[in-house]
Amino acid sequence: MNQLPTTTMASSPQTAQRVPTAHDDLPIPHALVQPAPVGARPWTMTLAGGGQIEGRGLSCCEECQNGEHDEQNLDPDRARMFLVDLCHTFHCDGFKADIFEDCHGRYTDTLLGARMYCSPYGHALEEQEPLVDIELGEGRHVENLTPDGMATFIANLREQADRLDNVRVQLVAARAEWNGEAPALAPRPADACPVEWCDRTGIHQGHCAEVPGIPVPGPLGHAYLGAELLDADDNGHVIAGFEGGGDWRDLDAAGLRAEIAKIRAHLPKLTALADQLAAIEADHHSADLGGAA
Ligand SMILES: [Zn+2]
Ligand SMILES: [Zn+2]
């Protein structure tokens, strides 16, 4: 979406209504008037010949927040360059990892940082609305991700993290085996069930392996998202029992995975809510300090 900057001319109240393109002269000093966006601080540029251009900012852009896009006293050529180069950005740091590469040897790289960007007057049409690049390592990017593209990348990343969790479990076991240590899992008790996945002991009806639910904070002792493998009739027909909202449902592996996918999709919303609350709490805290001063 090409949101056009607002020009206010000190000496010419008439502004021409025209739409700039990447290959056209940008609208200096005449520009289409666009309402200021809600929430974001607009950038401003004053022109050498008098007058001022104002354009929309993006709330998450650090440079917008700090007024770093603002320019003064630009001649028309530099004003055009300013518009073409204008880029709203938001950064998320990656994490450091030590890497070995055949041709480069050992080095530390930062992995999986992200950069959101938007060039409202840039040459690439798709970049005129916000997109994200994810940096795999220095100089290696997955580029131009839309929200849907980013969701796919994140889902794949989470599944990969699960696979890596399993690799870690195997690593712990492999190291224990290698070092001649006791296996990580406790030996099965003498009265363990002969059905290997069953965690019941002694004489019992059917077979069951339980993953207890997560306790709800508070005194009532409720829990949620409990699950179990169950062969109630000891006939080899194993299902997953899954507890949600107080009801237990019988699921097969695909059904349980579908519920896990829903829980995963839900977690970022909870995280965002916690972030919002933390910001509100910080505001109240500083207001309290201000009141005490
Ligand atoms: Zn900005
Ligand atoms: Zn059993």
Image: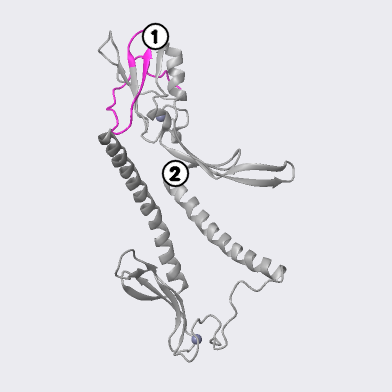
| Residue at 60 percent of width and 62 percent of height | 168
Q: Would you say the beta carbon of the disc 1 residue lies within 8 angstroms of ligand 1?
A: no
Q: Are marks 2 and 1 in contact (CB under 8 Å)?
A: no
Residue identifier under label 1: 48
Is the residue marked by circle 1 packed among few (<14), some (14-19), or many (20+) residues within 10 Å? few
Q: Which residues are magenta?
A: 23-52
In the rendering, at what x and y percent does residue 19 appear?
A: 35, 24
Q: Amino acid at mark 2?
A: Thr
Vertical relation: 17 (above or below) 196: above
| Residue at 31 percent of width and 18 percent of height | 7
Is the residue marked by circle 2 packed among few (<14), some (14-19), or many (20+) residues within 10 Å? some
Magenta stretch containing residue 38, yes or no?
yes
Ligand 1 is found in the corner quadrant, namely top left
Would residue 5 be visible to someone looking at this image?
no
Distance from the alpha carbon under mark 2 to that under mark 1: 38 Å
Would residue 110 be visible to someone looking at this image?
yes
In the rendering, at what x and y percent does residue 120 appear?
A: 41, 29
